[in-house]
Amino acid sequence: MEGDRQVYLHDKFYGHQDTWLTWGSTASGWRCGQYVYGSIVDGDVDFIFGDGALVIDRSTINVENDGPVLQRRTGRPRPPGARSPTAS
């Protein structure tokens, strides 16, 4: 999924590794902002990753294993990536 200001409401995302990528194009400096509300994000290891702005709000994050959940890229100067103010 590409584009800025993406909104996902009451969705389900299931995967193993690399389930959710929030990413900006390195060549054009393009930015990516995503907002997830009332959803389920399911994964195993490093399944939420990238360098774009991601807010997961009032959603459930299920970890299927004991691996790390977030893998944040910090190569370019920009505000912090993933946020989860009310995820359970």
Image: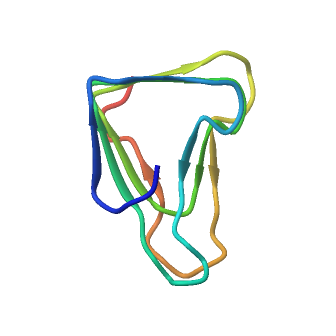
Query: Which quadrant holds residue 27?
Result: bottom right
Q: Position of residue 55 (x, y in %)?
A: 35, 47
Q: How many marks?
A: 0
Q: Residue at x 48, y 77 (%)?
A: 78
In the image, farthest residue toward the top: 64
Residue 50 percent location from the top left of the image: 59, 56
Looking at the image, residue 27 sits to the left or right of residue 41; the answer is right
The image shows residue 53 at horizontal and vertical percentages of 41, 60
Near-viewer residue (61 or 19): 19
Colour mode of the rendering: rainbow
In this view, the residue in front, 34 or 56, is 34
Q: Is residue 26 above or below residue 64?
A: below
Residue 1 in the image: x percent, y percent?
Answer: 46, 49
Q: Please indicate whether residue 20 sits to the left or right of residue 82 in the image.
A: right
Relative to residue 44, is residue 25 depicted above or below?
below
Depicted 31 relative to depicted 57: above or below? below
Residue at 51%, 68% in the rendered image = 24
Would you place residue 31 above or below residue 28 in this image? above
- Quadrant the C terminus occupies: top left
Q: Residue at x 35, y 51 (%)?
A: 34
Q: Residue at x 66, y 15 (%)?
A: 64
